[in-house]
């Protein structure tokens, strides 16, 4: 059988005929396997949902216990039999609980990576490359202009700015799932042990992380206008910082932690004063390295700069094609 | 180079003047010579490097990257300098450690036309993306980080506690990398300089309010027209000629016609204007001649520049600044009679009996190139800075128009959560009935309270979004004040406002009763 037969593109998303499951479907289905908890991969309404225990905990925290029919946890590295296929989850290094889905059938192996990164992240298990015939990769930062610097360097810039502007509140725009907790953990590693203040929308997922064994240190939710926030770090969703919510912050220095911050014009457009290039996605060299490490002869490229990555694959003699999945990439481009 | 690149990056993203000053002060304090001097030169626009064309830079990167990947990257990033600095494939091990700013400047200055690509490639190989970007900006002119020469000097004055006037005075005699300047700033000897050709820090006027007049004696003051050009200081000695702007920047190269006519000796304070066939032209025509490195013969003929003198600081080698204003004016007239300069005339003193008569004169002065009146105490010496009392500017009452709010955009810094930049329009009759044509944009004039109300109104009435811009329902009338209305080919409406600001929010006025475009066009002298 051809490796391509392991996966089909259906209106709901990717489908494995051998395992009879959908992978990260964007519409409610009977049986879904989900790579991680971001909204463009994990949507509510599936009758059965299989994912890592961490991803299930995140999905419940985001959508409530009634959003799914049945929840089936599967620990990384433990294969299970689904109809004619064997399915295994393998860490993807993107956010807590994120996993690649490995499907084996008819002597062939396909890997759906979901979103992934290769840079170290203190809040989740590192990516493990899996040899396969068909590799489905993301390409959020699939252009050679994207080379993410070490997160520790960017955190050092944030702390240097805090030291140079002790009268200003440093408000960092972060996504609620993953980026917020990673930034907190990186700040702790750099020795910043002061209370970090949170927009209400970030609190629940931080609690989930801590419950799942990721220590984040002293955190406090922002309420009203009475907390002494000068010289402190505040985390909030980017949309809140660009809007009225930010008016409560004293003399806020607006920062943003995102891979897009590499492009000045994007940072300028968003009114960011201190752009921090911290990304939970693979950069260009890591996308290349990962594709080569999988040894896949066929690569399907999802959300992002598919054209550039497919062009590069063709130059390597790898058969690559873009996979048009609806609704992807919203997490990072909102 | 790393440190300089970091400074540029922080400056780009720091909108507030004070924030920029803080960054500059820290940089000048912490960076050793000669790097900080080269940084100062780059910021103040005195660093002359061989110009690199975009095609040279592009050619360099295209030799080293896949053309398809380069094109896709350029399409995404949208800026050549940034694309090149990010995509540059640096070797695993750089050929040498990263160069400092001084080494970078030296390497680029020493490069010949034929060695330039290799020199640049070597620098790129040794630098990180943000430093590569800084190199490209240094060589393609214009750092575009929102720092003027004046602001850089202000940072020096703040950090080292020296008067900015003295820094400006000495400036013309100093050269990059300014080691003698920094030595003086840090407590050493003042750099020796022949100041004959130097910029003399200017005396500036304060705006006067109506309620202040009863306390002032009309007879103590001389009055003249406030010209709507740019303030200049023209200095000529046997050693050379200089034309300085208000902040001491040398604007001479853009005005060779003025320089050529300066066949006299002295230092004149006056207004630079375009005067054609004896007629003073509007500011918009002068604007076309600003900021040019070379001026075409056609432009010189079409837009002849001219100095309208109102003060004489030096007569030959004699310093007149300690003399009273009235005496300096007499010396100016005598000086003019002696030298008979071309492209230079005197700003006429206005005769008046009392403030009422002067107020009438001011209201009548609506000619092109006039902004109102200047009042100068007859007994005042020429003092640097903006002393309160001796000189007043009395701008004529602004013009106003009731316009309709069309678009709003969020501001920066403290205003980043407020819709604070407003584009407004006037009604234009079309075949499908009246529609709005944008006539200007304002982001000042309102109080903090009014801003909160405007922001709330915008949020409640937005109809469409174009990137960061929000279109709103055409229902709110703003009374806009402006100093002049000029014809413009850059705006669809055909008119451009000078210094528009929001004077009042006309919550009460129906939008349909707002200004007609035809009225504004007539005001700008268009049919």
Image (cartoon, rainbow, N blue to C red):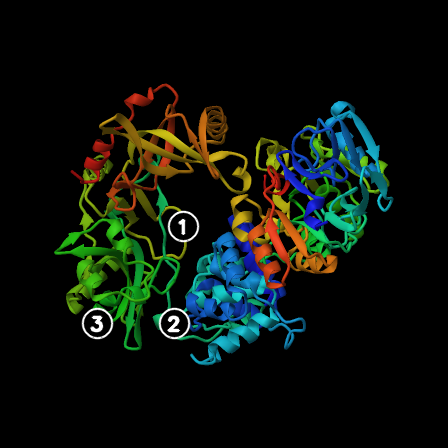
Q: Position of residue B118 (x, y in %)?
A: 51, 77
- Marks 1 and 3 sit apart, C-alpha to C-alpha, by 33 Å
**Left or right of B269, for residue B422:** right
Q: Residue at x 40, y 25 (%)?
A: B473
**Left or right of A108, for residue B173:** left
Q: Tell me which corner region of the image, top left, top right, bottom left or bottom right, holds residue B65.
A: bottom right
Q: Is residue B133 above or below residue B455?
A: below
Chain bearing mark 3 = B
Q: Is A275 or B267 nearer to us in this picture? A: A275
Q: Residue at x 29, y 74 (%)?
A: B237
Q: Position of residue B165 (x, y in %)?
A: 44, 60
Task: Confirm whether residue B119 shows in the render.
Answer: yes
Q: Earlier in the sequence, mark 1 or mark 2?
A: 2
Q: Residue at x 49, y 27 (%)?
A: B459
Q: Is A315 or A55 nearer to us in this picture? A: A315
Question: Badge 1, how many Cα within 10 Å: few under 14, some, many 20+?
Answer: few
Q: Position of residue A310 (x, y in %)?
A: 59, 55
Question: Badge 2, how many Cα within 10 Å: few under 14, some, many 20+?
Answer: few
As helix, strand or loop, the secondary structure at mark 2 comes to helix
Report which residue position mark 3 lands on: B263
Q: Is B292 or B318 nearer to us in this picture? A: B292
As helix, strand or loop, the secondary structure at mark 1 comes to loop
Residue at the outermost front position: A1
Q: Earlier in the sequence, mark 3 or mark 2?
A: 2
Q: Position of residue B115 (x, y in %)?
A: 47, 80
The dot on residue B387 is 1
Quadrant in which the C terminus of chain B appears:
top left
Report which residue position mark 2 lands on: B195
């Amino acid at each position: 059988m051809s490796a391509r037969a392991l996966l089909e593109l259906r209106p709901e998303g990717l489908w494995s005929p051998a395992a009879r499951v959908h992978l990260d479907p964007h519409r409610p289905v009977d049986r879904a396997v989900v790579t991680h908890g971001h909204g463009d991969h994990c949507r509510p309404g599936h009758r059965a949902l299989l994912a890592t225990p961490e991803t299930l905990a995140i999905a419940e925290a985001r959508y409530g216990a009634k959003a799914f029919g049945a929840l089936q946890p599967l620990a990384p590295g433990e294969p299970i039999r689904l109809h004619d296929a064997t399915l295994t989850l393998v860490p993807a290094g993107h956010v807590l609980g994120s996993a690649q889905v490995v499907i084996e059938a008819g002597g062939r192996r396909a890997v759906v990576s979901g979103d992934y990164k290769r840079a170290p992240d203190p809040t989740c298990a590192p990516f493990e490359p899996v040899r396969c015939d068909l590799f489905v990769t993301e390409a959020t930062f699939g252009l050679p202009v994207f080379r993410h610097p070490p997160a520790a360097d960017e955190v050092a810039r944030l702390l240097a700015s805090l030291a140079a502007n002790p009268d200003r509140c440093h408000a960092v725009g972060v996504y609620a799932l993953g980026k917020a907790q990673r930034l907190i953990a990186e700040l702790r590693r750099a020795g910043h042990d002061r209370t970090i203040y949170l927009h209400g929308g970030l609190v629940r997922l931080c609690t989930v992380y801590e419950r799942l064994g990721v220590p984040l240190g002293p955190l406090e939710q922002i309420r009203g206008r009475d907390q002494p926030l000068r010289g402190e770090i505040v985390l909030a969703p980017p949309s809140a910082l660009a809007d009225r919510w930010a008016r409560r912050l004293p003399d806020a220095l607006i920062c943003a932690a995102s891979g897009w911050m590499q492009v000045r014009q994007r940072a300028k457009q968003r009114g960011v004063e201190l752009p921090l290039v911290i990304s939970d996605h693979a950069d260009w060299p890591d996308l290349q390295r990962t594709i080569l490490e999988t040894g896949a002869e066929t690569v399907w490229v999802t959300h992002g700069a598919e054209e550039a990555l497919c062009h590069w694959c063709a130059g390597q003699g790898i058969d690559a094609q873009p996979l048009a999945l609806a609704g992807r990439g919203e997490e990072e481009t909102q | 180079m790393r440190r300089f690149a970091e400074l540029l990056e922080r400056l780009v993203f720091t909108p507030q003047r004070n924030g920029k000053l803080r960054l500059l002060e820290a940089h000048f304090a912490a960076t050793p010579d000669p790097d900080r001097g080269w940084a100062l030169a780059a910021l103040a626009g005195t660093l002359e490097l061989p110009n690199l064309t975009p095609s040279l830079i592009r050619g360099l990167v295209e030799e080293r990257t896949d053309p398809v990947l380069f094109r896709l990257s350029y399409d995404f990033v949208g800026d050549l300098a940034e694309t090149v600095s990010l995509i540059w494939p640096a070797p695993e091990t750089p050929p040498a450690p990263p160069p400092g700013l001084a080494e970078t400047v030296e390497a680029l200055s020493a490069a010949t036309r034929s060695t330039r690509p290799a020199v640049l490639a070597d620098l790129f190989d040794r630098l990180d993306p943000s430093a590569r970007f800084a190199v490209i900006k240094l060589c393609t002119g214009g750092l575009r980080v929102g720092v003027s020469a004046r602001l850089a000097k202000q940072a020096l004055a703040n950090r080292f506690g020296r008067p900015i006037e003295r820094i400006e005075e000495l400036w013309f005699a100093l050269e990059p990398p300014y080691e003698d300047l920094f030595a003086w700033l840090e407590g050493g000897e003042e750099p020796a300089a022949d100041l004959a050709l130097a910029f003399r820090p200017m005396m500036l006027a304060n705006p006067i309010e109506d309620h202040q007049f009863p306390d002032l004696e009309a007879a103590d003051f001389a009055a003249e027209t406030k010209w709507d050009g740019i303030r200049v200081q023209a200095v000529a000695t046997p050693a050379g000629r200089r034309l300085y702007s208000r902040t001491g920047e040398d604007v001479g190269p853009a005005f060779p016609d003025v320089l050529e006519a300066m066949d006299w000796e002295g230092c004149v304070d006056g207004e630079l204007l375009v005067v054609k066939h004896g007629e003073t032209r509007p500011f918009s025509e002068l604007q076309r001649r600003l900021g040019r490195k070379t001026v075409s013969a056609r432009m010189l003929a079409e837009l002849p520049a001219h100095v309208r003198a109102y003060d004489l600081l030096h007569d030959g080698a004699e310093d007149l600044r300690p003399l009273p204003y009235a005496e300096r004016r007499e010396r100016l007239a005598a000086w003019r009679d002696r030298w008979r300069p071309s492209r230079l005339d005197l700003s006429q003193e206005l005769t008046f009996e009392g403030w009422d008569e002067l107020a009438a004169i001011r209201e009548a002065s609506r000619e092109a190139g006039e902004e109102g009146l200047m009042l100068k105490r007859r007994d005042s010496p020429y003092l640097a800075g903006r002393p309160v009392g001796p000189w007043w500017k009395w701008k004529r009452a602004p013009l106003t128009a009731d316009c309709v709010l069309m678009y709003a955009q969020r501001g920066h810094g403290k205003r980043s959560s407020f819709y604070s930049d407003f584009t407004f329009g006037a009604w234009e009759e079309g075949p499908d009935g009246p529609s709005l044509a944008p006539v200007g944009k304002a982001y000042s004039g309102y109080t903090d309270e009014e801003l909160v109300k405007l922001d709330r109104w915008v949020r409640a009435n937005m109809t469409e979004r174009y990137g960061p811009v929000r279109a709103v329902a055409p229902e709110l009338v703003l009374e806009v004040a402006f100093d002049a209305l000029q014809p413009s080919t850059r705006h669809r409406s055909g008119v451009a406002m000078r210094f528009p600001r929001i004077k009042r929010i006309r919550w009460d006025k129906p939008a349909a009763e707002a200004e007609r475009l035809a009225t504004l066009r007539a005001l700008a002298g268009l049919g």
